[in-house]
Amino acid sequence: MDTLERIRQEALSPRKTDDGRPCLGIVVPPSPFTVPEGWEFVLRRPFEGVSYIATVLHNAGYRIKIIDVRWIADPVNAALEGTLEGVDVLGIATYEDSFLFLEEFLSRVKQKHPGMLTILGGSLVTSVPQIVMENTRADIAVLGEGELTVLELMDRITKDKIGPIEEVPGLCYKNNSGGIIFNQRRPQMQNLNSLPTMNFSLWPEVHEKPRIKEIFFSHSRGCYRDCSFCYRTTPRLSLKSIDKFRNELRELKGKHQFEFIYFVDLTFAIDKERAIKICEVLKEFNIRWSCMCRAENLNKEILTKMKEAGCQIILYGFESLDQDILDKAHKGISPAEIRMMVGLTQEAGIQVGGLFILGLPGETPGSLNKVLEFINDTGSACRVKYLSAIPGTEIYRLAVEKGIIKNEVQHLRWLSKERGQSDDEFINFTDLPDQELRRICKEINSNYIKGPRVYEDWF
């Protein structure tokens, strides 16, 4: 039986938890980025990636302990306290702003528990594995999509070993002399139907109080575009069937009585036919939701159906209103399409959340003024952040080649501090003075309209 088929079968009939198997602790690190008003729930709701990994292993009989320190004032010490009891193997999720946490936390873990096996997974270690592994005390990294790889890895480090980790695709690890070894790459799953429904109850807060007002959810992975500033752990587009989508929502609704979905698909409306079918499913649940879309694959009919299905806000990745900048970023859209889509969305009664990036290659005073004029003309709720050279992206490679990034490790540390506010330190990829970019950033963010969820309580 191959691993994907095993996951499918164990989703249908989970194994009993086996106390003889090692307990995997999964640490969810903090982010330094400021959460805009109306989106506070993202700090406390179960993430998809960790939820899927935990569910797959739990269904296979492994003990799981999630240590979530996203909102903790002293996350390193809180995570250390969470690993002291009952954890045999330690996994840590990594994101582009996690490096400082990884450095300190892994160092202190190894001081207290020198024999504990540590495993990294997620976007940061997948994008620059050599750098992360060489500069932290991690033992193993899961690269790319993690469900299959983690399950095969855990099977090989239990007391009933079934083979060496050298045979597990999708891993890199340190050998006895500290060298970094890369196994064969693991292809991305194209059919997501074998994945289990996420078991949110594995998260401590949900286990104590099952109701979750907001959930993260998706019907796809990856994207069909390749924007210069965007890194994707799962680059290719893969899908759930409509029936799978419906069945998962029905199960989660029954368990958690959620009332809002934040769809984390990189583009919700992949094509018109699929978008309409998804909206038909969502109407069955009488909920509200938000999603991310590109300024394409949408029209008046689809937007009307999205509104009828409960869509409250669409987050559009506009990035710029200058065609030259959009072309250099490989966006595949035009300013005319952006303006048209804003009008259609507003006519449908859906709030527009426009997302812009300041400082893309080609930025000029004229391109910045176009953004300000657009916001004033449309009255849309827009957010802006400075261009970050995220590891694994074309922008990052260019910055290294041109010497804008002089030290990659220092850059990862810097990414762990950047908060995207108007007066924060940033890397200027343009010929414009810093103060001009700061002025525009402040002016755009002054027009911000709060997000879709008013803070009441965490659960």
Image (spheres, rainbow, N blue to C red):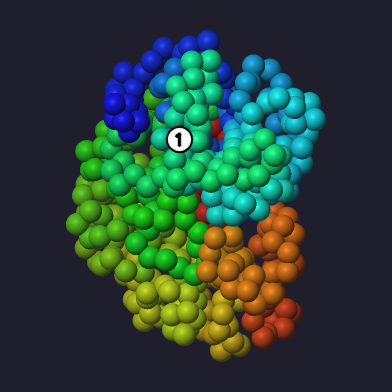
How many neighbours does mark 1 have within 10 angstroms: few (below 14), some (14-19), or many (20 or more)? few
**Position of residue 153 in the picture relative to residue 224 (left or right):** right
Q: State the image quarter where residue 369 is shown.
A: bottom right
Q: Is residue 189 visible?
A: yes
**Position of residue 44 in the picture relative to residue 62 (left or right):** right
Q: Amino acid at mark 1?
A: Glu
Residue in the picture at 37% in, 47% down:
188
**Position of residue 159 in the picture relative to residue 238 (left or right):** right
Residue in the picture at 43% in, 74% down:
330
Q: State the image quarter where residue 255 is shown.
A: top left
Q: Is residue 335 above or below residue 129?
A: below
Q: Is residue 170 above or below residue 420?
A: above
* Mark 1, residue position: 167
Q: Position of residue 436 (x, y in %)?
A: 69, 81
| Nearest to the observer: residue 390 or residue 291 | 390
| Nearest to the observer: residue 315 or residue 168 | 168
Residue in the picture at 56% in, 18% down:
22
Q: Position of residue 201 (x, y in %)?
A: 48, 24
Q: Farthest residue toward the front?
A: 177
Q: Quadrant of the N terminus?
A: top left
Q: Position of residue 16 (x, y in %)?
A: 41, 12
Residue in the picture at 39% in, 54% down:
222
